[in-house]
């Protein structure tokens, strides 16, 4: 985006490199637009480097000595640079060869009649000639001792850089200066555009060493920038809110500030990324991190300004805050306010942290609030006004940073002086619907009427204090405001005039001193977003949580389609809860059961970006592995007492464990009040790697009710206990218990047992209704975290209905349904069968009692709490009312009259409606070919 404004103020905003200039009627402001061309990318590098040089305030003499150390310039015998002197063409050839790192042939033969092959400059001249940077005088000579002119050296720089970067110079380009030779016009234009040289009144004159040093220094530094690989030089985190990344070369702003290009371990969030003025440093604002903790930082797809890309970079970064926060400065922002700036982000501040005194008199502090857009700043408001030219003692104490440290107590005397300068504003960012405006000091009085673009009638639709556009800025005191335009008045692509009025009616934008903002018009170069959003990162946070990050804000995160498929491509029977982030650039998907240890495929579709064109994302699919990240510990400990042999003790874990579980040193036991003792028995695995068998020694006094204590046990994925140790009470050996019985279809019943069963016989199970009413023809078992899920398939003659609660389930002990120890599952009689059958529509489910009423009949009673009119569409519109009638009827009321004989289309959303047992309806699209109004059938 290109920006110009109607005021003589230059903004050095690092995001936009804004240029501002007084605009008069009929005038035209020309500013180079952002482009993807390499030439413009190079120019960006130069502008970044130029800002660094300016910031460091290097003199030409400083630059000379720097280049001298690198061997590019030679000094005089007296050691002085003599910047006023001229330089020869052969000296210029040496500078060019060394600045661009050309291949220098020490045995090069001269191709010019006036340069001897053994002359010191021959190798530099020939290296430059070889790549086309330097030419002779056209008559076979080079004139090595003639002074080089500004335009000659400018040509060498422009051609050398074009050769280095493989770009073509515009031969039609010119400069508005009479003192340029015709042949040099496009070379001077290119050198100026690229920032290689400064502007001069006369380019035909001999170049002095000042010109050569300045231009060679800038060019050399940026050659290094272009040719150096993009790497991370360092990462650091000396507070709990920021991580600082220093790169080797200047960065592309867009990718450097894209938070989806950064990822932190342990689910720590990267909330913001800001490229600093040096162009090489990015400061990340992060979510909850812990002090003295190491995190893994991954960086992907960050680009340099010259087009290099950093891919799959990973490093460990230790967050370590050991220093108390320090006040850096205090600035008055009004007659009753000032801002306190700290050296790091602050987490909490209150008015009691600030005292203001004039002599022995204390001024009451109204508030002290951390700036939401810059947490290093605390905005302080006073109840009374400060007096001009008066000294005030300000004390700041006990303001806390994110580590909980309070600031080093600060006390300083300031002289308050009234400010009479009107506030100004710069444009931070803009797209077709939102413009971010930053004022140079706090202002108030803003309304939507103060902002318009193109035409005065195309006013803003809203102004907000936050980028999420949730907090109205009308009447608020702000430094940053987000101006929103509706779709009917969106900014067109290309150059757009955007105006901020200082006054509209009685409403004025003023600073805290009452200085009124002066009307300013900005010329923005707006680019239409026609790119579809993409998924940039998918993170498995836990066994039940997935975080998906997108390339940009998504308009309809909650309405997208998210599906999890098993390894066979079948949809998983899980409920997914969708939680969008505030910035709409990521979403958290939470499932209602753990997927640890499983590999699934996530599919995402039906999403559009939050732009004017609502670009639709292509269907996304990725395979995810939910690794086991926790050790769930001991399930139970069982004792088998034997008369003629030593007793056996079984320790059954919830998951497979390593050989650490058969190491006797990792076990202790305690019986009653006795001391804790070590086992003397023999340890080994039994049946599987979840079960440890201990053949007790005669000295092992373990009984029913004793406690077994374990430590240092790891599962097969290397996870250990959360606590140092865990204990479990010893019980006698029991069979598996059924914990829940649920009908999951009209022909299937699922029975959950609390242990692993090794054998299951469907003949052991029967249905009863006072007498046996049904048997089973098939069985499937599935091991899960709770134990074993047994699914029984009914005979055809034993179909279930959810309206028959009298039917119950029985299990008989026959020795055929047993666990690994051969123990029968505990028998039961008359166990209630819960409703797990999803509701369905009856045949001919839709009736139309009258022109404004529709009734839909389901197979069972429906849940009134899972009912919302937005779950339905009738002929494309939502009904005005929805209710449940007679338990299993849902009644829709519509405002538009239904017409006898016309078609009726009804859509019911997927997985929204539930029955009274909270089983969700699959969703349906219904079509009634011809409406039959029942009230028309009433006898007259």
Image (spheres, helix red, strand yellow):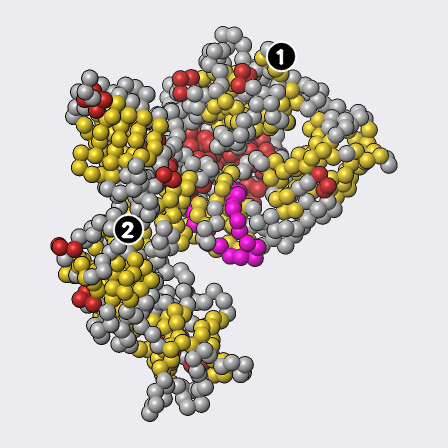
Q: Which residue is mark 1?
A: 506
Q: Secondary structure at mark 1?
A: loop
Which residue range is magenta in the image? 280-308
The answer to whether residue 928 is left or right of residue 259 is: left
x, y percent for residue 515: 68, 19
Residue 719 visible at all: yes
Q: Secondary structure at mark 2?
A: loop
As drawn, 414 above or below 439: below
Q: Quadrant of residue 304?
A: top left
Q: Is residue 303 magenta?
A: yes
Q: Residues within 10 Å of mark 1 (few under 14, many from 20)?
A: few
The answer to whether residue 532 is left or right of residue 800 is: right
Which residue extends farthest bottom?
644
Q: Residue at coordinates 60% horizontally, 26% vertically from top-left?
A: 476
As drawn, 579 above or below 176: below
Which one is earlier in the sequence, the residue at label 2 or at label 1? Answer: 1
Q: Is residue 655 magenta?
A: no
Which residue extends farthest left?
796
x, y percent for residue 160: 41, 33
**Quarter that holds the N terminus:** top left
Q: Residue at coordinates 43% horizontally, 80% vertically from top-left?
A: 704
Looking at the rendered structure, which numbered label has been put on residue 836?
2
Looking at the rendered structure, which numbered label has been put on residue 901?
none
The answer to whether residue 891 is left or right of residue 434 is: left
């Amino acid at each position: 985006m290109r920006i110009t404004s109607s005021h003589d103020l230059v903004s050095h905003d690092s995001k936009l490199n804004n240029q501002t200039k007084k605009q008069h009627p009929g005038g035209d402001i020309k500013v180079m637009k952002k482009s993807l061309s390499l030439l413009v990318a190079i120019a960006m590098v130069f502008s970044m480097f130029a800002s660094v040089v300016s910031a460091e305030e290097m003199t030409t003499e400083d630059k000379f000595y720097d280049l001298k150390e690198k061997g590019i310039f030679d000094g005089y015998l007296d050691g002085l640079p003599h910047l006023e002197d001229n330089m020869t063409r052969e000296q210029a050839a040496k500078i060019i060869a060394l600045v661009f790192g050309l291949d220098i042939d020490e045995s090069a033969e001269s191709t010019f009649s006036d340069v001897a092959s053994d002359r010191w400059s021959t190798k530099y001249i020939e290296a430059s000639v070889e790549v086309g940077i330097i030419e002779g005088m056209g008559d076979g000579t080079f004139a090595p001792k003639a002074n080089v002119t500004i335009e000659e050296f400018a040509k060498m720089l422009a051609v050398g850089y074009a050769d280095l970067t493989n770009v073509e110079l515009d031969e039609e380009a010119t400069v508005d200066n009479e003192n340029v030779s015709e042949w040099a016009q496009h070379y001077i234009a290119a050198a100026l555009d690229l920032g290689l040289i400064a502007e001069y009144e006369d380019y035909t004159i001999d170049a002095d060493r000042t010109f050569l040093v300045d231009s060679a220094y800038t060019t050399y530094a940026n050659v290094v920038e272009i040719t150096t690989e993009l790497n991370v030089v360092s990462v650091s985190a000396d507070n709990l809110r920021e991580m600082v990344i220093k790169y080797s070369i200047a960065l592309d702003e867009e990718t450097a500030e894209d938070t989806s290009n950064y990822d932190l371990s342990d689910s720590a969030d990267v909330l913001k990324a800001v490229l600093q003025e040096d162009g090489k440093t990015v400061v990340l604002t992060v979510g909850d991190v812990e002090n003295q903790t190491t995190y893994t930082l991954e960086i992907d797809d960050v680009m340099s300004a010259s087009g290099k890309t950093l891919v799959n970079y990973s490093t460990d970064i230790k967050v370590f805050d050991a220093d108390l926060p320090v006040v850096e400065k205090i600035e008055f922002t009004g007659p009753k306010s000032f801002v306190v700036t700290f050296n790091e982000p602050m987490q909490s501040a209150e008015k009691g942290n600030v005292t203001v005194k004039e002599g022995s008199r204390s001024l009451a502090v109204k508030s002290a609030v951390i700036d939401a857009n810059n947490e290093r700043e605390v905005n302080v408001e006073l109840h009374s006004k400060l007096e001009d030219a008066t000294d005030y003692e300000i004390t700041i104490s006990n303001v806390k940073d994110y580590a909980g440290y309070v600031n080093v107590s600060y006390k300083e005397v300031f002289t308050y002086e009234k400010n009479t300068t009107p506030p100004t504003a710069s444009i931070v960012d803009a797209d077709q619907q939102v413009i971010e405006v930053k004022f140079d000091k706090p202002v108030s009085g803003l309304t939507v009427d103060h902002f318009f673009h193109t035409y005065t009638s195309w006013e803003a639709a809203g102004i907000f204090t936050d980028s999420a556009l949730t907090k109205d800025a009308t009447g608020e005191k702000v430094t940053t405001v987000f101006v929103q335009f509706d779709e009917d008045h969106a900014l067109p692509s290309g150059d757009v005039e955007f105006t901020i009025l200082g006054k509209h009616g009685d409403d004025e934008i003023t600073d805290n001193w009452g200085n009124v903002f002066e009307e300013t018009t900005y010329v923005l170069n707006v680019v239409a977003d026609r790119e579809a959003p993409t998924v940039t990162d998918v993170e498995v946070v836990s066994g039940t949580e997935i975080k998906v990050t997108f390339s940009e804000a998504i308009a309809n995160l909650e309405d997208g389609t998210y599906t999890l498929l098993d390894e066979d491509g079948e949809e998983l029977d899980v409920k997914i809860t969708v939680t969008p982030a505030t910035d709409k650039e990521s979403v958290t998907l939470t499932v209602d059961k753990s997927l640890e240890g499983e590999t699934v495929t996530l599919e995402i579709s039906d999403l559009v970006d939050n732009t004017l064109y609502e670009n639709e994302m292509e269907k996304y699919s990725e395979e995810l592995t939910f690794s086991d990240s926790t050790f769930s510990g001991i399930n139970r400990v069982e004792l088998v007492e034997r008369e003629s042999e030593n007793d056996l003790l079984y320790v059954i874990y919830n998951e497979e464990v390593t050989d650490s579980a058969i190491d006797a040193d990792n076990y202790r036991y305690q019986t009653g009040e006795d001391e804790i003792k070590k086992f003397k028995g023999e340890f080994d695995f039994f049946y599987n790697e979840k079960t440890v068998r201990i053949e007790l020694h005669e000295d092992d006094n373990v009984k029913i009710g004793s406690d077994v204590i374990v430590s240092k046990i790891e599962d097969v994925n290397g996870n250990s206990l959360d606590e140092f140790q865990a204990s479990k009470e010893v019980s006698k050996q029991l069979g598996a218990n059924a914990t829940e019985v649920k009908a999951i279809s009209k022909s299937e019943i699922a029975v959950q047992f609390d242990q692993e069963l090794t054998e299951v016989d469907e003949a052991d199970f029967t249905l009863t209704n006072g007498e046996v009413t049904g048997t089973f023809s098939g069985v499937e078992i599935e091991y899960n975290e709770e134990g074993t899920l047994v699914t029984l398939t009914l005979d055809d003659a034993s179909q279930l209905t959810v309206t028959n609660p009298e039917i119950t389930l029985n299990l008989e002990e026959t020795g055929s349904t047993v666990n690994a120890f051969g123990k029968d599952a505990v028998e039961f009689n008359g166990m209630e069968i819960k409703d797990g059958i999803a509701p369905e529509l009856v045949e001919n489910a839709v009736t139309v009692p009258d022109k404004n009423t529709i009734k839909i009949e389901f197979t069972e009673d429906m849940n009134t709490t899972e009912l919302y009119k937005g779950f339905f569409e009738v002929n494309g519109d939502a009904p005005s009312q929805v209710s449940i009638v007679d338990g299993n009827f849902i009644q829709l009321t519509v405002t538009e009259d239904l017409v006898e004989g016309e078609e009726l289309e009804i859509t019911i959303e997927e997985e929204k409606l539930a029955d009274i047992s909270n089983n969700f309806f699959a969703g349906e699209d219904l079509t009634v070919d011809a409406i039959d109004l029942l009230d028309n059938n009433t006898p007259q």
